[in-house]
Amino acid sequence: MAGFSALRGQGHWPTLLAAFLYFDFSFMVWTMLGPLSSEIAESLAIGGFVISESQKATLLSIPVLAGAILRIVLGFGVDKFGAKKTALASQLLVIIVLFYAYFRGASISYDELLVVAVGLGFAGASFAVALPQAGQWYPPKLQGTVLGIAGAGNIGVVIDFLFAPKIAELWGWESVFLVGAVLSSIIFVAYIFMAKDAPLEVYTPRPKKLRDYGKLLQDRDTWWFNLFYAVSFGGFVGFAGYMKVYLMNTYQADMSAFGIDILNEPNVKVVAGYFGALCIFAGAILRPVGGAIADKFGGVKSLYIFFGVVLALVLLSASVTLPFYLAIGVLFLIMANLGMANGAVFQLVPQRFGKDIGIMTGLIGAGGGLGGTLLINTLGWSKEAFGGYSAGFLIFGGLVLLAITGISLVKTRWRTTWGVSAGGRI
């Protein structure tokens, strides 16, 4: 396994750290609406707008959808203008949106929140900048570990669930946007001094044109990777974004009792944030582990295992309403395996598309965002149409099964073609 010790003396660690921090806090901002969903819904209701389950799902999914589309835009920016300039421009827009939401406060309308949600998509698109900037500094044999570390910035959503509900309880939900704006400003300054684009002797940029995107979209492997990432990252960000809504709708009484008896925390929304953070933490922290496992055993074999576990647990969740503690354990394992699958997918991508990693990170990241958008809206539709989430879990399970079938269809061709020339384990 290409362990973390192998990174010593390689690449540029300040850039790797900057990429992690940039993606970490960007991911925190991107998913900010999820842990605030209940508080925002209550605020809108006070103003006379009662939000439905489908409207709530739409609000939560728009940052994910916008992030998916903008990843392609920022991926193009990385190849055209460099990762650092692209990151700083995007971060500045995010800071402006966060301050706007704070100053509008409780008087903000649902339509304005939809616009804010689009702006937060720029934070989600940071994936298309952080990963290639970190990866450009390191050799192919370390890509799984390096991109896993940079991608582990998605632990930012854990910070959301741990602190956002409590901050909202103490000072109002709009204050969370102020905290996000201040932290994003600090990261903006740190990024200026820490991050560097790889020098020409390490990485030679090849600016791409729109027709280059079209050429890559004609490659069937692009679509396979989009499918795999729509399941792994789409599943992770989709469950993360909808986690609090799901827990509040399904296990509110259990969490209330747990909070009062054990945590001395009577606010069930805060308790829901704690349990959501626990489950999401598994997927966030284990992403680099998944990349390292794929470096040793191969990305294809690793994806078989990770997706297989997810499929079994999703079908279990669809079949029965699990007891509270068992449901938390199942969600924890689902998120853990989705996180490791994220690392495994991006152990394979640089081997197949090393010369086009900027564009491909954007394209594949877009697929992941679209998968998350689909999952959030499917869960919201399932709850509104049937009063539960079984249908939503079944549909996602079908997508996981499709991905496993896809791996079976491509593994032989991959191993006998670009897998040989790449010199890595696939």
Image (cartoon, rainbow, N blue to C red):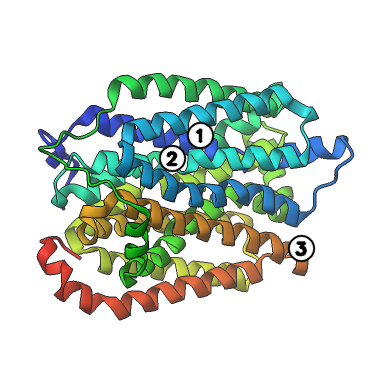
User: Which label belongs to residue 384?
Assistant: 3
Per the model, the C-alpha gap separating discs 3 and 2 is 30 Å
Q: In the picture provided, is 272 more to the left or to the right than 9?
A: right
Q: Earlier along the polypeptide chain: callout 1 or callout 3? A: 1
Q: Which residue is mark 2?
A: 155
Q: Earlier along the polypeptide chain: callout 3 or callout 2? A: 2
Per the model, the C-alpha gap separating discs 1 and 2 is 7 Å
Residues 339 and 329: in front is: 339
Residues 242 and 409: in front is: 409
Q: Which residue lies at the image location 44% right of the left edge and 19% below the top edge?
A: 186
| Amino acid type, residue under disc 2 in the picture | Ile
Q: Residue 58: x percent and y percent? A: 68, 53
Asked if the residue at tag 2 contacts the one at tag 1, i.e. Cβ–Cβ closer than 8 Å, the answer is: yes
Q: In the picture provided, is 227 more to the left or to the right than 51?
A: left
Per the model, the C-alpha gap separating discs 1 and 3 is 29 Å
Q: Quadrant of residue 111?
A: top right
Q: Residue 84: x percent and y percent? A: 33, 31
> Judging from the image, what secondary structure is the residue with disc 2 in?
helix
Residues 80 and 309: in front is: 80
| Amino acid type, residue under disc 1 in the picture | Ile
> Judging from the image, what secondary structure is the residue with disc 3 in?
helix
On the rendered image, what quadrant is the C terminus found in?
A: bottom left
Q: Which residue is mark 1?
A: 159
Q: Residues within 10 Å of mark 1 (few under 14, many from 20)?
A: many
- Is residue 211 something that shows in the picture? yes
Asked if the residue at tag 2 contacts the one at tag 3, i.e. Cβ–Cβ closer than 8 Å, the answer is: no
Q: Which residue lies at the image location 55% right of the left edge and 24% below the top edge?
A: 181
| Amino acid type, residue under disc 3 in the picture | Glu
Q: Residue 126: x percent and y percent? A: 42, 40
